[in-house]
Amino acid sequence: MNKKMAIIATKGTLDWAYPPFILSSTAAALGYDVEIFFTFYGLKLLQKNLDLEVSPLGNPGMPMPIPVPVMIQALPGMQSFVTSMMKKKMEDKGVAPLDELRQLCLEAEVKFVACQMTVDLFEMDINTFMDEVTYAGAAAFFDFAGDSDISLYI
């Protein structure tokens, strides 16, 4: 019997999109059965078109080349600026683009589960989501997570 890893992905920004995909692809490569339960803003990670940004607001641990006061971080255009800065840094360091990392997860048979309650709550158009997504409630996730060796909330 394979080890299992369950992840709950709740964030929908570029910087928060990497951890669930990096951890799940690594675990799958190590032979784990992996399931990611995407809920609330994490559902953005399931969209066919990944157009994610980084928000410097409320993220005091984000390393900036120069200290930027919160007031300036709130100015129009700062989110786009920070996002382009992050994408450039990732490209320069050879970090895989998010869509490639997500595809790697699918090829490694990581199961992507969208929280049906959240989809209904926000009246989301499931046609914007990838075809590989399954839909279930929290009880179905607990069925998998209850037997998992590792469970993570991201």
Image (cartoon, grey):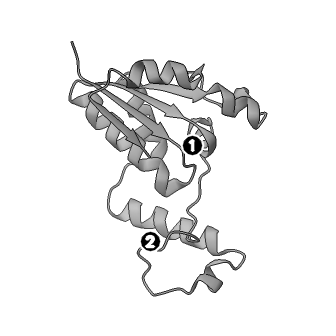
Where residue 9 sits: x, y (%)?
Answer: 49, 41
Please count the marks in the image. Answer: 2
Front one among 151 and 22: 151
Point 74% across, 29% down: residue: 120
Residue beneath the point at 53% across and 21% down: 139
**Quadrant of residue 138 within the rendered picture:** top right
Is the residue marked by circle 1 packed among few (<14), some (14-19), or many (20+) residues within 10 Å?
A: many
Instruction: Please tell me which residue lies in front, 23 or 6.
Output: 6
Task: Return the residue at label 2.
Answer: 62
Q: Is residue 19 left or right of residue 52?
A: left
Work out whether 114 lies above or below 153. above
Counting from the top left corner in percent of width and height, residue 13 is at: 56, 54
Q: Is residue 60 above or below residue 39?
A: below
Residue at the (56%, 87%) spot, across then down: 69
Instruction: Work out whether residue 2 or residue 65 is closer to the camera in this orientation and state it.
Output: 2
Farthest top residue in view: 1
Q: Amino acid at mark 2?
A: Met
Is residue 97 visible in the rendered image? The answer is no
Kind of element beneath mark 2: loop
The numbered mark at residue 42 is 1
The answer to which quarter of the image holds residue 125 is: top right
